[in-house]
Amino acid sequence: MVEYRIDRRSGIATYLQIVQQTKQALRLGLLEPGDRLPTAKEVVAATAINPNTVLKAYRELEREGLVEPRPGLGTFVRRSLARPGAAADSPLRAELADWTDRARAAGLDREDLTALVASVLEERFGETAAPGERGHEENG
């Protein structure tokens, strides 16, 4: 089950953080069709956020066709966003982990890596949108 981590200093709305983290889990294959998302009560207990914020996030995920509520049972994953190359156990992930270790050994910190990756993504994809804002992947 996914565990949400809320960064109150990020400048990103809390419900969007939940949406983004859910999509990331779907992309990595950590959540699969049929899996139940944590209940609003469970998320509130773990994060101390308003239950309406959780429900808003889940409604957004439902609107995008990624989850479906089942009255009395919870909210369940309808479809995955996983691609073989992005799975948690993929060779590409292992290569990225190795690269990250080399970058850290070279003295780069998290912010350096984030800037470097964002720069290369912009160069290669020609976009500056944050993950999940491009639209075509989530609606496909």
Image (tube, rainbow, N blue to C red):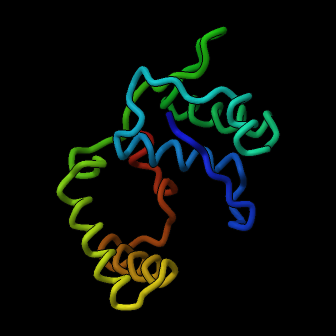
Residue at image x 58%, y 31%? 63
Query: Which residue sits furthest left?
Result: 91
107 left or right, relative to 11: left
Residue at image x 52%, y 56%? 133
Residue at image x 55%, y 29%? 37
28 left or right, relative to 72: left
Query: Which residue sits furthest bottom?
Result: 107
Residue 131, image x and y in percent?
47, 59
Nearest the eye: 34 or 100:
100
Residue 93, image x and y in percent?
26, 59
Q: The C terminus appears in which quarter of the rendering?
A: top left
Query: Which residue sits furthest front?
Result: 105
Residue 29, image x and y in percent?
34, 40
Residue at image x 53%, y 48%? 21
5 left or right, relative to 27: right
State whether residue 42 is above or below residue 122. Answer: above
- Total residue callouts: 0
* Occupied quadrant, residue 121: bottom left
Nearest the eye: 4 or 69:
4
* Occupied quadrant, residue 30: top left
Residue 53, image x and y in percent?
76, 40
Nearest the eye: 4 or 86:
4
